[in-house]
Amino acid sequence: MDSTLKFPSKKECIYTSCYCEENIWHLAKNILSANKNVSEFKCYVTFVSNSNKCVPLWKQKSSTHDDGLVFWDYHVFLLLDHNNKILVFDLDSSLSFPATFLEYINEAIRDDNHQSKYNRYFRVIEAKKYLLKFSSDRRHMLNENDQWLMQPPTYPPILNKDQEHNLSCFISMDVSNEYGQIYDLENFKNKFFQTH
C-alpha cells in the first residue's frame, strides 16, 4: 500500500462560487479516486450550519472585511485524516490549501461567541457515502420567478440514483436523518484533535 497522499491544487479543482456542496462533491471524488491505494486514509465531507441558517466563518475570500468574515447560511469543506494529521480543504477560504486542522479552527472557525443564534454545528459524513447519497437539482438557488440567484455550474446537476433533491437533509442539523454525525463546536474539535 502507498503512503503518499495525492490531492489537486486549488486551481485544478472544479469550482463555482456559492455551490460549495457541489465543489466539495467533486473534490471528494477526485481525492478518493487518486488515493485508492493509500493506507490509513479517511475522508469526510463537513457541513456547518445551525437552525437559524446563519453561521460566521473567517478567512473567506468573498468577504469585504479585513478578517475575511462571512455569515453563511451553510458552508461545506473536506477533512482528510492521514498519518495522524487532519487536513482541511476549503475552496472558499484564503488560508492555505489544504490547511492544517489547527490552522483552520484557529483562523476560520474560531470560538463560538456568546450569541447562541450564531453557534455552529457540524455534520460530518464519510466522503464515500456523500458521493453516493448527495443529490441536488439546484432548486435552492432559484428565486420565486425561477431566476438564478447565482449562476449554476456548467455541468449537469449532481443527482443520486433516486434523483431526489436532498441537499436540505445535509444542511439540517437535526440528528434524526441518516447522513453522518452532528457535533457542536467543542465536540467537533475534540473528535479531530484526538487523532493527533
Image (cartoon, rainbow, N blue to C red):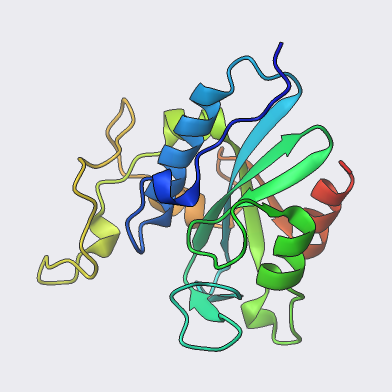
Q: Is residue 137 left or right of residue 25?
A: left
Quadrant where the image shows the N terminus = top right
Q: Is residue 85 left or right of residue 181?
A: right
* Nearer to me, 147 or 6: 6
**Residue pictured at 61% horizontal, 65% vertical:** 95
Rendered location of residue 192, percent (x, y): 80, 48
* Nearer to me, 145 or 7: 7
* Nearer to me, 29 or 12: 12
Rendered location of residue 31, percent (x, y): 53, 32
Using the rendered view, name the quadrant where residue 125 is placed: top right
Rendered location of residue 98, percent (x, y): 62, 51
**Residue pictured at 89% horizontal, 46% vertical:** 194
**Residue pictured at 24% horizontal, 67% vertical:** 150
Q: Is residue 175 visible?
A: no
The correct choice, above or below, for 69 with respect to 35 in the image is: below
Rendered location of residue 89, percent (x, y): 58, 50
Using the rendered view, name the quadrant where residue 187 is placed: bottom right
**Residue pictured at 25% horizontal, 47% vertical:** 137
Q: Is residue 112 left or right of residue 146?
A: right
The correct choice, above or below, for 190 with respect to 64 in the image is: above
Q: Can residue 17 be seen in this view?
A: yes
Q: Is residue 37 left or right of residue 31?
A: right
The correct choice, above or below, for 39 with respect to 76 in the image is: above
